Image (cartoon, helix red, strand yellow):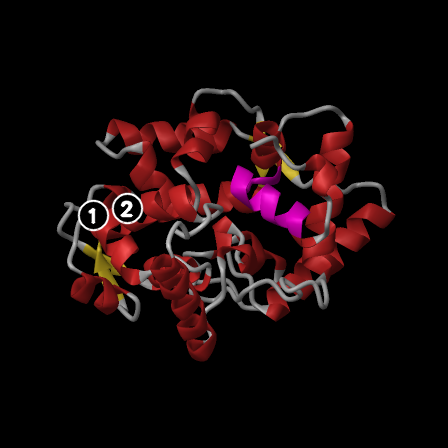
């Protein structure tokens, strides 16, 4: 199948988040809103049927989510009919997943972008490489290789994703002066290498090689796309919806919803820890 041209709505719905595709998406969104025809969601039926076909062939929700750049929770909510609609971009990602993408053996290899970004973000947050290596059950020397790896084994990518989900908003060890010193050294190394913390990423961008950290993640500026997503989230919250429901409606993860609110100082809507 021919790849859609960059700078078009089709490319954006296919998962591309380059500047040209984001402009095309925002232009189409403004146009449809002006005509009162803006509908960012579509029936989840086609996505649900495709997920069932993939699981019927032996794929798991986790593998499908990995291939689509979504989480297993996203796939589960769509598959079990919890949500009747999904975002157009979410549908495009799911329908693009092939059976071969979810049936690869655990020793197969995949692009290392998401693995690198997750580990680098945790180091930028102050988690030391020795702590991360212990969490992954590997030697620190192997962990250092993953920080720059271009390709990784699928089983390793899944382990790193689980570790990241546990630690992205957790405080690094700081009970002793040595731990505090090591944590500060980890942050300094990340700054020297240009690694950004978890707050700079939306979960659905971590595995996308074309994606970049959110502009203004240090609260110096905000990008239009982020403002639009914030507006969508606030509107959904105004209906009394839960974090899980808002995340599913936006086609992103609960963690991404939290980060959007944090970037814009919307503390009143943060979940109780």
In the image, farthest residue toward the front? 177
Asked whether residue 253 appears in the rendered view, the answer is no
Q: Which residue is mark 2?
A: 158
The quarter of the picture where residue 3 lies is bottom left
Please say whether residue 232 is one of the residues in the magenta stretch.
no
In the image, farthest residue toward the bottom? 192
Q: Main secondary structure of the magenta part?
A: helix
> Residue at horizontal 28%, vertical 54%?
131
Q: In the picture provided, is 258 more to the left or to the right than 178? A: right
Residue 21 position in % (x across, y down): 61, 64
In the image, farthest residue toward the top? 81
Mark pair 1, 2: CA separation: 5 Å
Q: Secondary structure at mark 1?
A: helix
Comparing 22 with 115, the one in front is 115
Residue 114 against residue 71 in the figure, above or below: below
Q: In the picture provided, is 3 more to the left or to the right than 25? A: left
What quarter of the picture does the C terminus occupy? top right
Q: Indicate which disc residue 155 carries.
A: 1
The quarter of the picture where residue 226 lies is bottom right
- Determine crowd level at label 2: few under 14, some 14-19, many 20+ residues with C-alpha closer than 10 A: some
> Residue at horizontal 55%, vertical 62%?
17
Comparing 2 with 237, the one in front is 237
Residue 60 position in % (x across, y down): 28, 33
Residue 150 against residue 66 in the figure, above or below: below
CB-based contact (under 8 Å), mark 1 and mark 2: yes
Q: In the picture provided, is 37 more to the left or to the right than 185? A: right
Q: The magenta stretch spans which residues?
A: 250-262
Asked whether residue 180 appears in the rendered view, the answer is yes
Q: Secondary structure at mark 2?
A: helix
What quarter of the picture does the N terminus occupy? bottom left
Residue 271 position in % (x across, y down): 62, 33
Comparing 182 with 244, the one in front is 182
């Amino acid at each position: 199948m021919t790849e859609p041209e960059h700078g078009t709505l089709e490319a954006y719905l296919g998962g591309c988040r380059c500047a040209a595709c984001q402009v095309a998406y925002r232009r189409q969104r403004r146009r449809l809103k002006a005509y009162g025809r803006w509908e960012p969601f579509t029936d989840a039926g086609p996505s649900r049927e495709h997920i069932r076909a993939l699981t019927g062939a032996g794929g798991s929700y986790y593998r499908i989510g990995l291939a689509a750049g979504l989480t297993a929770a996203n796939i589960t909510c769509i598959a079990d009919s919890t949500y009747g609609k999904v975002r157009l971009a979410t549908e495009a990602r799911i329908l693009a997943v092939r059976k071969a993408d979810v049936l690869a053996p655990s020793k197969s290899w995949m692009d290392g972008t998401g693995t690198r970004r997750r580990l680098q973000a945790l180091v930028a947050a102050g988690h030391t490489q020795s702590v991360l290596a212990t969490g992954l059950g590997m030697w620190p020397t192997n962990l250092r290789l993953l920080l720059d790896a271009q390709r990784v084994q699928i089983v390793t990518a899944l382990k790193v994703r689980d570790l990241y989900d546990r630690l992205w908003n957790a405080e690094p060890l700081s009970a002793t002066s040595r731990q505090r010193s090591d944590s500060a050294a980890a942050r300094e190394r990340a700054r020297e290498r240009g690694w950004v913390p978890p707050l700079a990423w939306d979960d659905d961008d971590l595995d996308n090689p074309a994606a970049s950290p959110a502009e203004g993640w240090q609260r110096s500026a905000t990008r239009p796309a982020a403002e639009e997503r914030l507006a969508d989230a606030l509107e959904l919250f105004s209906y009394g919806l839960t974090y899980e429901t808002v995340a599913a409606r936006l086609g992103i993860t609960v963690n991404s919803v939290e980060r959007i609110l944090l970037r814009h100082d919307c503390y009143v809507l943060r979940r109780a820890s």
